[in-house]
Image (tube, grey):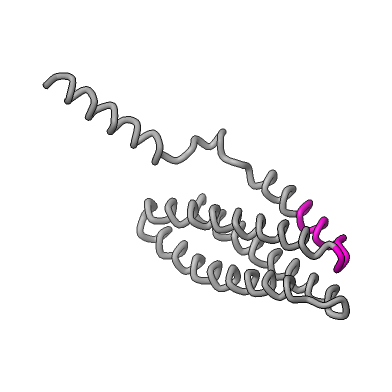
Amino acid sequence: MLQTIRAGLCAIVFAAALTAPLPLAAQTSASDVKQKTSAALSAIGSYTVDKKDQAMAEGKKLVADMDRRMKELETQAAQSNAETKAAAQQAMVELKQKHAKASQKLSDLGNATSASWDSVKSGFTDAYKDLADSFEKAASKLHQ
């Protein structure tokens, strides 16, 4: 009986450890994220149409990372006070719209021809920069 209780408690502690947010020191700083984003967008900007697959891979990484960051922000917002939660929810609506636009531009990048490459590539980088800027604003509202 005592062994069953210990096993149950261990399972609860383990589950809590897995679901607890990372301490601030373990989380990626905003400046690190900006640097990585800037480097990835610069790389995408330098690719020619011949390297479309590499550009798509970089773009997919950026979008996937933003998905993760948006989910973290949404979780933090759900745990905040009512006023902050309302502002964060409004910001999340805008973020989701901009995320959809960046995702569409990424899809367009995959379908770009050599004639449209530069324009489509700029469309994605501009849409992602807009999304990243909006994310920074939303995160700063939440952490005020």
Q: In the rendered structure, does residue 44 fall within the stretch colored magenta?
A: yes
Give the quarter of the image for residue 53: bottom right
The image shows residue 19, relative to residue 130, as above or below, that is: above
- Magenta part of the chain: 38-50
Asked if residue 4 lies left or right of residue 13, the reply is left
The image shows residue 81, relative to residue 99, as above or below, that is: above
Asked if residue 90 lies left or right of residue 69, the reply is left
The image shows residue 94, relative to residue 77, as above or below, that is: below
Residue 128's spot in the image, x, y percent?
Answer: 69, 65
Closest to the observer: 73 or 84?
A: 73
Residue 92's spot in the image, x, y percent?
Answer: 49, 65
Asked if residue 88 lies left or right of residue 3, the reply is right
- Residue at left offset 79%, top offset 70%: 121
The image shows residue 7, relative to residue 95, as above or below, that is: above
Q: Main secondary structure of the magenta part?
A: helix
Give the quarter of the image for residue 27: top right
Residue 114's spot in the image, x, y percent?
Answer: 87, 76
Which residue sits furthest top? Answer: 2
- Residue at left offset 43%, top offset 58%: 84
Closest to the observer: 83 or 20?
A: 20
Q: Which quadrant is home to the N terminus?
A: top left
- Residue at left offset 83%, top offset 79%: 116
Q: In the rendered structure, does residue 123 fall within the stretch colored magenta?
A: no
Residue 12's spot in the image, x, y percent?
Answer: 28, 33
Which residue sits furthest left? Answer: 1
Closest to the observer: 10 or 143?
A: 10
Total count of labels: 0
